Amino acid sequence: GKPAVPIISGRFEGDAIASSRAFGMPDLRFVVVPRIYRNLSPEESIRNTEPAFEELVQMLTMEVDVGAASSGELIEDVDRFEGEDRFEAVLRMNEDYLRRDWGDGFPLMPPTRSIVDELLDGTNLSPDHVVCDMPPGFGIATVEKIAINAAAAGARPEHMPVIIAAVQALHKVSADGGKSLLMSTSPQAPLLIVNGPVARELDLNAGSALGPGFDNRVNITIGRAFSMCLRNIGQWYPNKMDMDTIGTTRKFIMCIAENEAMSPWDPFHVDKGFKPEESTVSVFITNGELDVQDQGNVTAEGLLKTVAYGATFGTRGLWNRHGEERLILLPPDVAAPVGAQGFTKRGAKEFIHMHANASLGKMTQYVPLENEARVAAHWKWMKGLSEKELLEITVPVLESADRYDILVVGADRAKTAVMPSGPSAITVGIDQFRP
């Protein structure tokens, strides 16, 4: 019942407009200042705010005509594009769609009525069936909307059950549907991993799975279709509801398969309670990528120590330790000897957790101990220690072995990919959506 006005830094003005519309507050008024406050000194914060103070007072005291602001952007008719031939019409469609940021920057396929209908035949759900509301803008993801975006990405009908399951999984990632992660200034991005028979049926690549080329054509297409849904249903538009500071190529989302045939352990979806003959897709939220190279270890312990040292990469300090995880894509040349020398998957995770350590001095650098808002009370005992003392105390970078996910992915050579991730991956069955 009290008036409130957000203070928005300049780059976030577009995000403020898009977010206020998406979250049911189209009349929201805000004041813009030049810089973000997070890393400003108190003196700089004052200089940042003082020029806006008079406008703040005015906003807080003025009468507000609720409903006067526009509740959405008017989109003119874009159903038909013409040219001297079909090729020119497609070029005009692409120019228009990409200008509106409805694509990923690459040429799109025309989502014609006939192609969309063909994709709808790839699932047992009706076109108007609501799969979920899709973050971060919580647009309503009907099967038909998913099919339209999948058509623009060049997907095939047999891909639809995977895409639908991935959309549903993203919705379940966290209490807010992943909204805060997707809208962050950090480079979080989803990664889709498929398990079960459907991976072989669709010819998803489980070898050099994250790269370009013919072998990864299905990986790229399904990931791109999911990305189009995230953009145009979830409203995940750059500089509106995706405020990533630098960006990442991981936002060209990929869909890969676990290399179950070359794994010494049960596949990931079996760990999650599914049967081996069931097909699933899991959505991981990744926040970086490191190539961990092993140059000659042959013992399981040596190989796992190399992975553990790599797992210290991407640590975001003590304040976020309870929410951090690591996605470890272990190639067969590491997984096979580790399994053959007696390590279960659980044992490998516990070994990695035991050896993935960092000093408190390094882990407090990310968020200084003086930051009262972000450092929990049970870490305040460190304030009296010198930097040398803090550097000499080591702790596991994650809370427990349960924070590590190991999947066997890759071709020959002992090179592991370690990705900071979190929250926990969500796995959804695919078979329920097949015709």
Image (cartoon, helix red, strand yellow):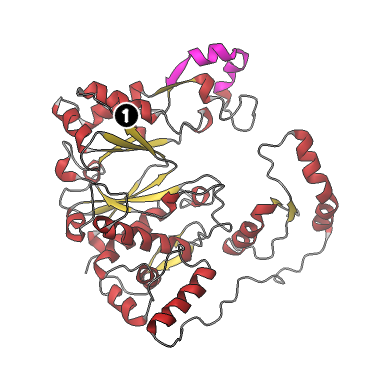
Q: Residue at x 41, y 28 (%)?
A: 312
Q: Mark 1 points at which residue?
A: 307
Label 1's element?
helix
Whether residue 267 sits left or right of residue 363 in the image: it is left
Whether residue 264 sits left or right of residue 422 in the image: it is left
Quadrant where the image shows the N terminus: bottom right
Whether residue 66 sits left or right of residue 194 in the image: it is right
Identify residue type, mark 1: Val
**Is residue 260 something one can see in this rendering?**
yes
Most frequent secondary structure within the magenta stretch:
helix
State the extent of the magenta-drawn residues as a range. 379-395
Near mark 1 (Cα within 10 A), the count class, few <14, some 14-19 or many ≥20, is many
Residue 201: x %, y % from top left: 17, 59
Magenta region includes residue 369: no
User: Residue placed farthest to the bottom in the image?
Assistant: 84
Residue 128: x %, y % from top left: 37, 74
Q: Is residue 321 above or below residue 31?
A: above
